[in-house]
Image (cartoon, rainbow, N blue to C red):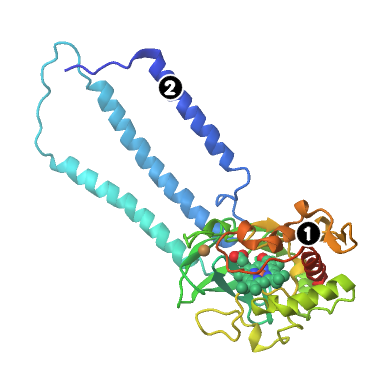
């Protein structure tokens, strides 16, 4: 029997252009998404090291197997008028070799993996270890600094070079905690406290992701890891530990009234409906809650830059409170204001999320935004 020939140049053209196209598509992935191969801390470095080790082992196997294969195809290909080759049945030596050699390679991978797994938690850093209870909600992340009496959401702020010990808890379904450039994935399981240590070595902002499908807004369950120099972290922490200031601006004061009227059903603000340093601050999950608050703690919301699992960003410059034609307070350029979009219709921005509220007027939104902006 003869091999059917490729139908010439056209066929090869298709194959090669498909390969080129896929490499262009893959190259595009690198632009905005963080890479596990660009680690910025010891945990991610060790994990990246394991990746490279397995890649080397796999490459050696691949090259060896493919070389023998290609050699056999070329060397023993069918030629015109060739007799049948000699038929073999069983060869102990060869069979032993191809059983033992792959076992050795797999064993090397196993050793490398186990070594890395047990080595991940042996990291050290500057100063004391910071304990943070991370609570996964549907669909946002809450960060409870258990020794420092503060609770935040969406933005996990840590000092550079310090060991962070997170305890991962879920208030609902299984999620998974992942900061690609800092640490690998760990499941967040209801009723179980998984521990995860990490350290970030370069100040900056890193993307955190939920990487276990957890419902409709799974893709919008993201957070930012903000790594600050030691001194900036200390002043950030001191500011977060203070209670919210009572505003003096009339719009903000009206906004605070509105907030106390309805928003406190789900949101906590220290100095408004939460006591400073009290047990109530403890992030809630799994029934062990001190409060029944369903939404993020907003005590210092104005120091954050993102809203609701990074679906929107916001900054006070794009949410200027002015007046409308009849002299009532209104946001000047609502289209540019993420917070306006959120308060206008949170269900349109993030369908299915737990913020179910009645419709607010533009005046009410402007007053609430004035208040939220005062929460420095
Ligand atoms: C029924 C509970 C509930 C009520 C009432 C409620 N919220 Fe929310 N709010 C939430 C939840 C839950 C989230 C987080 C949604 C998500 O990301 O999935 C949220 C998110 C927010 C955020 C973004 C916070 C962050 O850290 O990302 C702001 C700001 C906010 N709400 C303001 C308000 C204001 C102002 C009111 C009153 C008009 C209000 N909320 C009423 C539950 C509520
Ligand atoms: Cu999730």
Residue farthest to the front?
326
The quadrant the C terminus occupies is bottom right
Q: In this view, does 313 lie above or below 73?
A: below
- Helix, strand or loop at mark 2: helix
The label nearer to you, 2 versus 1, is: 1
- Residue 219: name its quadrant: bottom right
Task: Write the residue at 55% across / 32% down.
Answer: 24
- Residue 331: name its quadrant: bottom right
Residue 248's spot in the image, x, y percent? 90, 76
Residue 176's spot in the image, x, y percent? 50, 64
> Tag 1 or tag 2, which sits nearer the N-term?
2
Label 2 CA crowd tier, 10 Å (few <14, some 14–19, many 20+): few
**Quadrant of the displayed image that contains ligand 1:** bottom right
In the foreground, 346 or 314: 346
In the foreground, 209 or 297: 297
In the foreground, 289 or 65: 289
Rendered image: mark on residue 315: 1
Residue farthest to the top?
80
Q: Is residue 183 above or below residue 168?
A: above
Determine the CA span between mark 2 and mark 1. 49 Å
Please name the residue that numbered disc 2 is placed on: 14
Residue 315's spot in the image, x, y percent? 78, 59
Q: In this view, does 12 lie to the left or right of 284?
A: left
Cβ(mark 2) to ligand 2 < 8 Å?
Answer: no
- Residue 73: name its quadrant: top left
The quadrant the N terminus occupies is top left
């Amino acid at each position: 029997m003869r091999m059917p020939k490729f139908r010439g140049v056209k066929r090869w053209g298709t194959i090669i252009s498909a390969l080129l196209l896929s490499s262009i598509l893959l190259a595009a992935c690198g632009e905005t998404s963080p890479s596990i191969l660009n680690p910025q801390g010891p945990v991610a470095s060790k994990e990246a090291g394991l990746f490279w080790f397995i890649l080397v082992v796999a490459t050696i196997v691949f090259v060896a197997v493919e070389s023998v294969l290609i050699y056999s195809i070329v060397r023993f290909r069918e030629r015109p008028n060739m007799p049948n080759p000699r038929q073999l049945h069983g060869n102990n030596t060869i069979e032993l070799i191809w059983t033992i050699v792959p076992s050795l390679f797999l064993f090397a991978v196993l050793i490398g993996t186990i070594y890395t797994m047990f080595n991940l938690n042996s990291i050290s850093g500057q100063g004391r270890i910071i304990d943070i209870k991370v609570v996964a909600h549907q669909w946002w992340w809450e960060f409870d600094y258990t020794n420092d009496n503060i609770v935040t959401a969406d933005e996990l702020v840590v000092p550079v070079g310090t060991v962070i010990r997170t305890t991962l808890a879920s208030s609902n379904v299984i999620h998974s905690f992942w900061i690609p450039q800092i640490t690998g994935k760990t499941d967040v399981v209801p009723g179980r406290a998984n521990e995860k240590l990490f350290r970030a070595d370069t100040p900056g902002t890193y993307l955190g992701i939920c990487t276990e499908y957890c419902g409709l807004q799974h893709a919008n369950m993201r957070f930012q890891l903000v790594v600050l120099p030691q001194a900036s972290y200390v002043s950030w922490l001191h500011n977060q530990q203070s209670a919210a200031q009572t505003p003096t601006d009339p719009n903000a004061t009206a906004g605070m009234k509105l907030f106390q009227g309805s928003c406190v059903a789900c949101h906590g603000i220290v100095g408004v409906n939460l006591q400073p340093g009290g047990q109530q601050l403890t992030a809630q999950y799994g029934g062990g809650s001190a409060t029944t608050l369903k939404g993020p703690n907003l005590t210092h919301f104005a120091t954050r830059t993102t809203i609701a699992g990074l679906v929107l960003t916001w900054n006070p410059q794009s949410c200027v409170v002015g007046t409308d034609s009849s002299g009532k307070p209104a946001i000047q350029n609502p289209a540019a204001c993420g917070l306006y979009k959120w308060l206008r219709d949170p269900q349109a921005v993030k369908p299915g999320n737990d913020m179910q509220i009645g419709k607010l007027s533009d005046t009410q939104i402007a007053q609430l935004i004035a208040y939220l902006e005062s929460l420095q």
